[in-house]
Amino acid sequence: ERSTGLVLLSARAHPWQPRMSHAPPGNEGHPGFTTPEQDAQVNELKAAIGAGLGSPAGQVWVRVNGGEQCELCRLMRARDWDVDKAKTLWDEIMAYRAEHQIDTLLQRVIGNQEPQSTKDLTYKPDIKDPAIAKCLNEMPCARWGFTTEGNALEIWRINQLRPQDILNRCTQAELTQWWHYWAESALEANLLGAEHHGKPLRGTVLVLDLKGFGARHLHTAMLRSLVALFGIGQSKYPESMSRVFILNAPTLFAGAWNAIKPVLNARTRRKIIMTNKAMHDDLSPLIPAQNVPDFLGGPCPCGIGEALSQRGGTMKTTTVAARSDFKVVENVQEG
């Protein structure tokens, strides 16, 4: 059973950097980089949650988030260091996970398999759940190893996304279940990456390649579905994303961005970097040179989304070239 794997994972060390008087950019509010006032607030939150931290469900959630101190700091950062709001967030997460039986989801879907490999870029666990497997087959995305800092690296090739096909083949309930799986496996992957690289736990680095983004992607029903999924990510998996890089962004993307942006809180928006180029100076040092995908100008063959491309879709592709003067919409440091 996967419970055995959970025990082994819980024994892994997840190093925290030592306390510093001035935290490097992006480390503020993380364990080892808190102020005395923030320490007092964390202790207040711990007392407010009380026995919930030691409950079976609480222990599962604390473990996948790197331990008690990491989770308490995460909740506080997500709610701007307001203890009452952070306690409410904890209660909402626990209730949601119980309602959807998320604590046992990975055991049901992949059993004892690791969610990601530290050696094989193309590794994917076998999916036991037919609905989740079906949704995964519609998504031009993959986790592509780890960054040099131990973050799980997730890449999406949006030109291979076929919104109408997704809506034709997957119900919203199935997409929600897939989203739960994707988020849960990301937490486990980041634990694995932090341990393997001996780095602090910081969350996923997400890369969205928008080359080929066209009018067919401005699909109202699909955007509505994505907004619902992003809402789950914001409210039930707070602070699980380290940084987001949107590459090859054309002017047409502004329409989709305007629909999605209001769902994202200010902290998440500050983690987003958008450019019309195929690479960004902040992303380049994060990906090991030998792992940079060929479609982003690197040497590594990468088949993300190619099965969808070969299968074809229900709508004709329309592309819009990126304007050379497209500017970064959001460009801030990790937080």
Image (cartoon, rainbow, N blue to C red):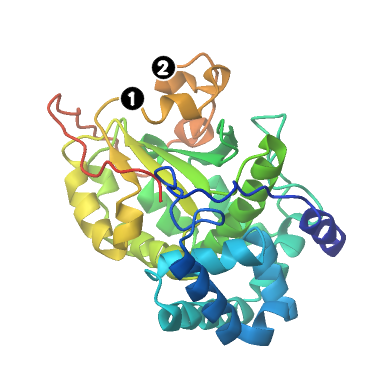
Labels 2 & 1 near each other (Cβ < 8 A)? yes
Q: Nearer the viewer, residue 181 or 187?
A: 187
Q: Residue furthest toward the top?
A: 299
Q: Earlier in the sequence, mark 2 or mark 1?
A: 1
The local crowd at label 1, few if under 14, some if 14 to 19, many if 20 or more residues have their Cα within 10 Å, is some
Left or right: 76 with respect to 196? Answer: left
Disc 1 is placed on an element classified as loop
The amino acid at mark 2 is Gly
The quadrant of the rendering that contains the N terminus is bottom right
Q: Amino acid at mark 1?
A: Ala
Tell me the SS state at disc 2: loop
Coordinates of residue 178 in the picture (x, y in percent) = 56, 60
Taking the image as shown, residue 128 lies to the left or right of residue 245, namely: right
> Which residue is labeled 2 in the image?
297
Q: Residues within 10 Å of mark 2 (few under 14, many from 20)?
A: few
* Residue 158 visible in rendering: yes
Residue 184 higher or lower than 91, as above or below: above
Residue ID at (59%, 49%)? 201
What residue sits 62% from the left and 49% below the top?
A: 16
* Nearer the observer, 210 or 245: 245
Residue 171, visible in the rendered structure: no
Q: Position of residue 116 (x, y in %)?
A: 68, 42
Q: Is residue 206 above or below residue 211?
A: below
Residue at image position (39%, 71%) is 79
Alpha carbons under labels 2 and 1: distance apart: 7 Å
Q: Which residue is mark 1?
A: 278
Of the pair 203 and 260, the residue shown nearer to us: 203
On the image, the x and y values in percent for residue 329 come to: 20, 42
